[in-house]
Amino acid sequence: MHQIHHLIDGVTAGSASGRSGPVFDPATGEQTAQVDFASVEEVDAAVASARAAFEEWGTVSIARRVKLLYGFRNLIVEHTDEIAHRLTAEHGKVADDARGEVARGIENIEFACGFADSLKGTYSEQASTGVDVYTVRQPLGVCAGITPFNFPAMVPLWMLPNAVACGNTFVLKPSERDPSAPRLIVELAQEAGFPPGVVNLVNGDKVAVDRLLGHPDVAALSFVGSTPIARYVYTTGTAQSKRVQALGGAKNHMVVLPDADLNLAADAAVSAAYGSAGERCMAISVVVAVGEIADPLVEAIKLRMEKLVIGPGNDPASEMGPLITAEHRDRVAGYVGAGADAGAEVVVDGRLQSFDGDGFFLGVSLLDRVTTDMSVYTDEIFGPVLSVVRVDGYHQAVGMIADNPYGNGTAIFTRDGGAARQFQADADAGMVGINVPIPVPVGYHSFGGWGDSLFGDTTMYGPEGLHFYTRPKVITSRWPDPSTSTVDLGFPRND
């Protein structure tokens, strides 16, 4: 059985904890590897390595950091297919989704490569007579990242490049469900020339998470995952005086106005709801159908669902792969039954689709006439289940988004520029799409929601990411009057 170890201080470190977890191929249900679970002592060793490396790395020149980041970027590009293969093998997503995930991660490395301009300080000469005031941004020290199973390559690249670009060192704790892709990413960082200890990796479970949260030498921690864990990470970390950014769950609404392009909206709903098996925080899980478009929209979505090819991610014909575990598949399926019991109309029941083998597959489901008190609406399902809520007008749709505790992303489909412009002002969410169902910002903007989708004041990657990984220092300086200098500066001497 293939064993996946930690990477600490530039070398592979086998675990001494005696604890480990299984890694599965979701398409077959077979266990393919065993991943080490770090002990407290092993987390301490990774942090100690990062702390020692920071003493030098924090003073490394901008030119040197930029050169290493470009090398890292090039290695990720060269190994895109291998990273994508690991994603498909352990997460189950289809090849196109896997390659797209790597591409979005590369965007963030490329942004980090230009960090020198973003981190330039400010200078005020003669703020008072003979007094200059200027601001610089300095690294924090040891930073940690705790990343989720659904984007095991992209999310670490939201964090790691910006953290090390700013002069910090980094400890990554990836999901234990699909650890091979993040392992390769850290190996490539080391191959790019980052000194030992600048980037470390520890695998594990709650033991590792809690030790990172409580370790006195960890200055900042970034997290992406469910809302309950995001809240826990934020409250625990900040209680230890750490800087924390914690992105939580979502319940993203797609509003479709009566004037919308029906084909465009239906295509978007299917791709956004069922892509990556719905296991993404930016998936559309609720379509809000306004007025008379509801019936034709539901029918158009149903027709497209019938053509969706579900199968192993390594099959080029597959458009959707399996879910991450058998337990999660069964949990998602349970919501379809709960929705039906609560009175929703099950237009397409994914539980009825059968699959060969023991993979963690589930068909796609569409529930119509869902109401806001049903669990299929209130809970983050994180699977291929799409709910349709019918409303009479625009203001009901906007109010529904505002009343939902999550505020991650939302979208509107309309041909009316005035309505679209009003929606971008009214929508109570951190990321808004106009005829774009999944408005994930490009790498030079920043990612993050509102409400229960974000804990902390700083969103992820982009300009906000660079600010998160640095802290400002303001210097006020005064020098003696030049006329009193012992060096001849050409001024009249008072003596």
Image (cartoon, rainbow, N blue to C red):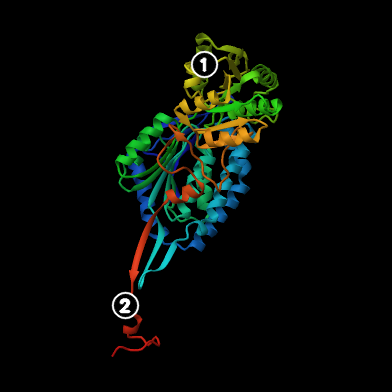
The extreme left residue here reads 495
Q: Is residue 13 visible?
A: no
Question: Above or below — where is 141 with respect to 33?
Answer: below
Q: Position of residue 454 (x, y in %)?
A: 44, 36
Quadrant of the snapshot with the C terminus = bottom left
- Residue in front for this viewpoint, 369 or 92: 369
Residue assigned mark 1: 371
Disc 2 residue type (three-letter): Pro
Q: Which residue lies under the disc numbered 2?
A: 480
How far apart are labels 2 and 1 at the CA level? 73 Å
Q: Residue at x 55, y 27 (%)?
A: 253
Mark 1 lies on a secondary structure that is loop
Q: Position of residue 297 (x, y in %)?
A: 66, 20
Q: Position of residue 3 (x, y in %)?
A: 48, 36
The answer to whether residue 238 is visible is yes
Q: Quadrant of residue 347?
A: top right
Q: Is residue 280 above or below residue 194?
A: above
* Quarter assignment of residue 261: top right
